[in-house]
Amino acid sequence: MELAPLSGIFGAEVDGVDLSDELTDTTIAELRAAFNKHHVLVFRDQELSPEAQMAFGRRFGELDTHPFVHAVGEYEEVLDIVTEPDDTVNFGGGWHSDLTFLEEPDLGSILYAVDVPAAGGDTLFADQQAAYDALSPTMQSMLDGLTAVHSARRQYGEGGLSTKSKAMQTHGTDAAATSIEHPVVRTHPETGRKGLFVNRAFTERIRGLRQNESAALLEFLYDHATNETFTCRVKWQPGTLTMWDNRAVQHFALHDYAGKRRHMRRITVKGDRPS
Ligand code: SIN
């Protein structure tokens, strides 16, 4: 297995692993160590059926299902993420970590490119641990004691942004209004590193602050957390698979390919309660 960095800060391209093989425990341990270190791993030229993708994902934990988007294929764990040529909104088209509105947000996501435009449709990632490290000690210690409220309401409530994608089976629901509280800074359960854990899609407010204070602080954090210094970019080809650590990164699916179709296949691995 060989690793080549994707940026000066995080992300790596992995060569020499065929994910459709039955991988040994040693290989999985090496991949897990690389995942914890680099947060985003990219594998090229993979030929993966949905079954093989699920088998690979299960080596990292139990697979999750999306609470608000219905899988259209045979398996409820496999989400086909499709943007049709005439879609004006794409799934994941804003900075976020997956499913932070859950009590136990997913540990990570494993996305496979089935069909992608010849140019465009890249995914951006932002390293939330690097973003935390770059803050002053005074700001860090203020954030360390705070919690934030997350909800799926703006995305999956009635008329929510994510219900506007024509290609996806998403229906706005009142159930999306449920809220959950998470620390603003989470400690990675496997490495002990601290990272920011708020995002524009699902975070609603910071507990204990006045509305204008909360809005101003969140705005600062959203901007800081996705500053270009902390980002890397994945360009897809059919057969590229990328897995990312939702406990350490945010991501953004660009929609710069109007008139073209993009088809990805995603599975997610269940995570733990952030602390
Ligand atoms: C997502 O999981 O948010 C979608 C990412 C992508 O399609 O690039």
Image: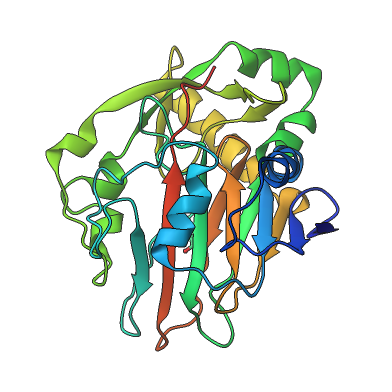
Colour option used: rainbow
242 or 256, which is in the foreground? 242
Give the image location of residue 169, x and y in percent: 21, 62
Q: Residue at x 52, y 33 (%)?
A: 198
Toward which corner of the image does residue 146 lie, by quadrant? Answer: top right
Residue 72 is drawn in which quadrant? Answer: bottom left
131 relative to 120, above or below: above
Q: Does residue 184 appear to the left or right of 171 in the view shown?
A: right
Does 85 sit above or below residue 128? below
Name the residue located 75 percent from the left edge and 45 percent from the top edge: 38
* Quadrant where the N terminus is found in the figure: bottom right
- In the image, 67: left or right of 190? left
The residue sitting at 73% across, 41% down in the picture is 26
Say whether residue 188 is left or right of residue 183.
right
Which corner quadrant holds the C terminus?
Answer: top right
Q: In the image shown, does 189 or 180 lie closer to the viewer?
A: 189
Residue 56 image point, x, y percent:
52, 52
Where residue 154 appears, as percent x and y from the top left, is 29, 45
Viewer can see residue 137 = yes
Q: To which quarter of the image does residue 36 belong?
A: top right
Q: Is residue 96 visible?
A: no
> Which residue shows up at 57% across the image and 41% down it?
222
Q: From the viewer's perspective, is residue 255 above or below residue 180?
A: below
105 or 185: which is nearer to us?
A: 105
